[in-house]
Image (tube, grey):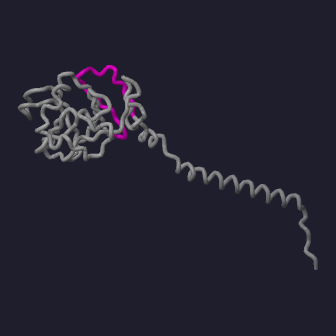
Amino acid sequence: MQPKSPPNPGRRKFLITATSTVGAIGIAGAAVPFISAFNPSAKAEAAGAPAIADISKLAPGEMIIVEWRGTPIYVVKHSQESMNEINKNLERLADPDSNTEVQPQYAKNEYRSRKPGISVLSAVCTHLGCAPKYYPQLGVVDFDSDWQGGFFCPCHGSKFDLAGRVYSGVPAPDNLAVPPHYFKSDDILVIGEDGDIA
């Protein structure tokens, strides 16, 4: 006995083609969320992006705080007086000539910055991650009788000079970190990239 041919071969082909097409669209639709999961979110992209700061209005002795990758960064414009005093307390520093901490090559100078007179420092104490406070004044302060300006962490008493170098005899073991940075122009600071502009 011979098998019977389908009553409507055109309809069978149409149903197979339509079912295959709908299945392919369903698979593609289900794959989109999986594929898009490999792309970073806008928040993740922003977190890794450099921070840009306009320092044109920063007066000598002033500091601004810029956020980069969720970390506050201190940007300090030194006064001429503080620049003159920056190396007068070297004997009080833990190791003023040490550059053992990880820092960009261009930060291995007395200002620890690409530009004399501007310090760019992580605002995180190297002891327990507190935020040291900025004390630009020189002279007698509550916590030091011969303060040369800098940062004091009131949590545990760590002290750093205006270049972020740690004092000896305090809990903090290292200098404040210097993030990668460069100056796009005299007034525009880019934090988070080394750039090729000195």
On the image, the x and y values in percent for residue 174 come to 21, 45
Is the residue 21 above or below the residue 153 in the image?
below
Between residues 126 and 165, which one lies in front from this camera angle?
Answer: 165
Between residues 23 and 4, which one lies in front from this camera angle?
Answer: 23
On the image, the x and y values in percent for residue 59 come to 26, 20
Q: Is residue 147 magenta?
A: no
Between residues 75 and 181, which one lies in front from this camera angle?
Answer: 181
In this view, the residue farthest toward the bottom is: 1
Quarter of the figure with the N terminus: bottom right
Point 15% across, 38% down: residue: 159
Point 15% across, 27% down: residue: 85
Along the horizontal axis of the image, is 13 left or right of 37? right
Point 79% across, 57% down: residue: 17
Residue 83, picture quadrant? top left
Between residues 63 and 22, which one lies in front from this camera angle?
Answer: 63
In this view, the residue farthest toward the right is: 1
Point 13% across, 41% down: residue: 157
Along the horizontal axis of the image, is 68 left or right of 61? right
On the image, the x and y values in percent for residue 148 come to 13, 30
Quarter of the figure with the C terminus: top left
Along the horizontal axis of the image, is 145 left or right of 12? left
Q: Is residue 63 magenta?
A: yes
In this view, the residue farthest toward the left is: 145
Query: Number of numbered discs present?
Result: 0
Residue 9, picture quadrant? bottom right
The residue range painted magenta reads 51-70
On the image, the x and y values in percent for residue 55 come to 33, 24
